Image (cartoon, rainbow, N blue to C red):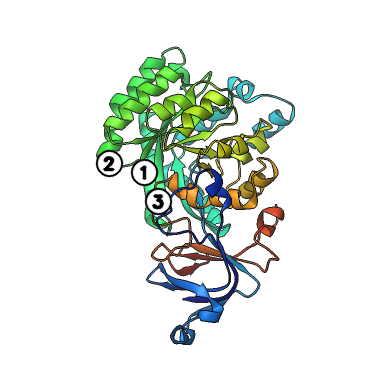
Amino acid sequence: MLITNIKGLVGVHPKDKLLLRGNEMSNLPILENAWLLVEDGLIKDFGEMSKIPALILNLSSQISAKGKFVFPSWCDSHTHIVFAASREEEFAMKIQGKTYEEIAAAGGGILNSADKLQHASENELFESASSRLKNMILQGTGAVEIKSGYGLTVESEIKMLRVIQRLKANFPIPIKATFLAAHAYPKEFKDNHQGYIDLIIHEMLPQIAEEKLADYIDVFCEKGFFSVEETDQILKAGAKFGLKAKIHANQLSASGAVEVGVKNYAVSVDHLEETNQHTINSLKTSNTIATLLPSCSFYLGIPFADAKGLITENVPVALASDYNPGSTPSGNMNFVVSLGCIKLKMQPEQAINAATLNGAAAMEISSEYGSISIGKKANLFITKPMPSMAYLPYSFGETQVETIILNGEIYNG
């Protein structure tokens, strides 16, 4: 496949550039009036139209991108798209001013989703998650991480992770699986935290490891959920089974969650709506990525993460959707990038880098995805005609994605 007359080829980073920090995040190389050649699912070559080799101009499979931009696919490194039912009944409660904690105390929240999921079959979960994932792909997402965490029993957590494995086998994009049984305490363990932690460590983890169902382990470290000490215990147990740490950190308070994530060599700490200088200091001396989820802040009406402060302190920042039924019922990464600009005050270049190369790095796949580099996977999207690259985040709520290319082939869903 040959794409010609590209107005702007976005994200032309060197192939050995796997993660962006600080000032690097403002550098989004764009090749103007370009061509791009795809072969065997990989980016074979690219360059300026004025220097296109005559030999490839005769290829039969050609796409003209005149007036259009070509982007690397969005890399969404934090989602919860395997769930049994939506939770719009909580929508009105949020509008009435009920807090996240109050909704959970009233029987809503994570436990609501867990109850519904425990009664859903694996096939039902697979079909509904497939529909969500297909829509995400058609909006430009070309790599995704999916968490468990709505099971909260041995049987249901395993069921969720098996659904994720089926998604991996049936979709043409890389999918990472994260084990998140430490999402909330089931009612029967409300006063026996260690009993549930023992269930995670001694029953769930061995089976997950035996079936190779997960890449990462995650914990919701927050007041009213899992303490710093409990989080540390669970992450260390996961590491013994080869599961690297990711962590829900500092969503509602600066609780020490980021620090325990860094201590356990977390690939990423996600949320970070509440940070302080101590939090930032622990991150800037580590290799842990700060994954920000602005559509969660938008939906819940909670503070937005301090992206500018993190970037200024040389912390690598990624953007992800947090698609889930309770706090972010959307997987539209175009809107996430817009919010990165509008609410996190990121420059368009920073937001796009955070949603592509750094998102790929947060899933440890940036050697193959997240930028336009020779030899990388040809997971791309072509926009509608646009006046500039910044028009994509500027025109929030109106999709600019026109053509999806995955593994070098047009994807129509």
Upstream in sequence: badge 1 or badge 3: 1
Please tell me in which quadrant of the rendered image residue 236 appears: top left
User: 367 above or below 326?
Assistant: below
**Residue corresponding to mark 2:** 211
Q: CA distance from mark 2 to mark 3?
A: 22 Å
User: How far apart are labels 1 and 3 at the CA level?
Assistant: 22 Å
In the rendered image, residue 222, in percent from the top left (x then y), is placed at 52, 22
Mark sitting earlier along the chain (1/2): 1
* Residue at which label 1 appears: 162
Q: Is residue 298 visible?
A: yes
Q: Which residue is mark 3?
A: 365
Residue flagged by tag 3: what amino acid is it?
Ile
Kindly report which numbered mark, 1 or 3, lies closer to the viewer in this rendering. Answer: 3
Amino acid beneath label 1: Arg
Q: Are marks 1 and 2 in contact (CB under 8 Å)?
A: yes
Between 158 and 101, the one lying in front of the other is 101
Q: Is residue 259 above or below residue 11?
A: above
- Residue at horizontal 52%, vertical 20%? 255
